[in-house]
Amino acid sequence: MKITKEEVDKVARLARLGFTEEEKEKFASQLNTILVYFDKLRELDTRGVEATSHASTISNVFRDDKVESSISKEESLMNAPDGKRGCFRVPRIIE
């Protein structure tokens, strides 16, 4: 299969892209080079090779979500500069 400059032009028109004659020739040449590589890949014997979606294995790097103990509300307020009724008190930012 070979892609012609006219086929590139047709796809460009459908995509509403404007290419110069040089660009059409360049893209046709590049697409034909890609097709040659695909033909080479077809020559490979892939029987017995499992299909994959990634070249390397992927594993989950996140830890399990576990409930763990934490400091109490009173402990967290011990170092607060200003606390009131069990809450942190901060300066007003909106007047």
Image (cartoon, rainbow, N blue to C red):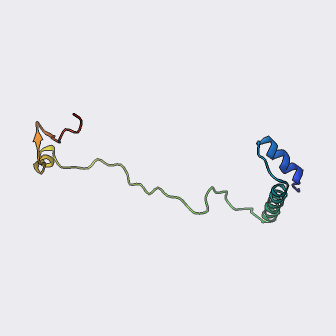
Tell which of 66 and 92 is nearer to you. 92
Which residue is found at the position 11% from the left and 36% from the top?
85
- The image quarter in which residue 35 lies: bottom right
Which residue is found at the position 13% from the left and 46% from the top?
77
Q: Residue 76's spot in the image, x, y percent?
A: 15, 48
Q: Residue 72's spot in the image, x, y percent?
A: 16, 46
Which residue is found at the position 74% from the left and 63% from the top?
46
- The quadrant in which the C terminus is found is top left
Tell which of 15 and 84 is nearer to you. 15
Which residue is found at the position 75% from the left and 62% from the top?
47
Tell which of 12 and 80 is nearer to you. 12
- The image quarter in which residue 82 lies: top left
- The image quarter in which residue 33 lies: bottom right
Left or right of 68? Residue 80 is: left
Q: Residue 14's spot in the image, x, y percent?
A: 80, 41
Q: Residue 84's spot in the image, x, y percent?
A: 10, 38
Tell which of 58 and 74 is nearer to you. 74
Left or right of 16? Residue 89 is: left
**Compared with residue 87, is residue 19 higher up or lower down, i.e. above or below?**
below
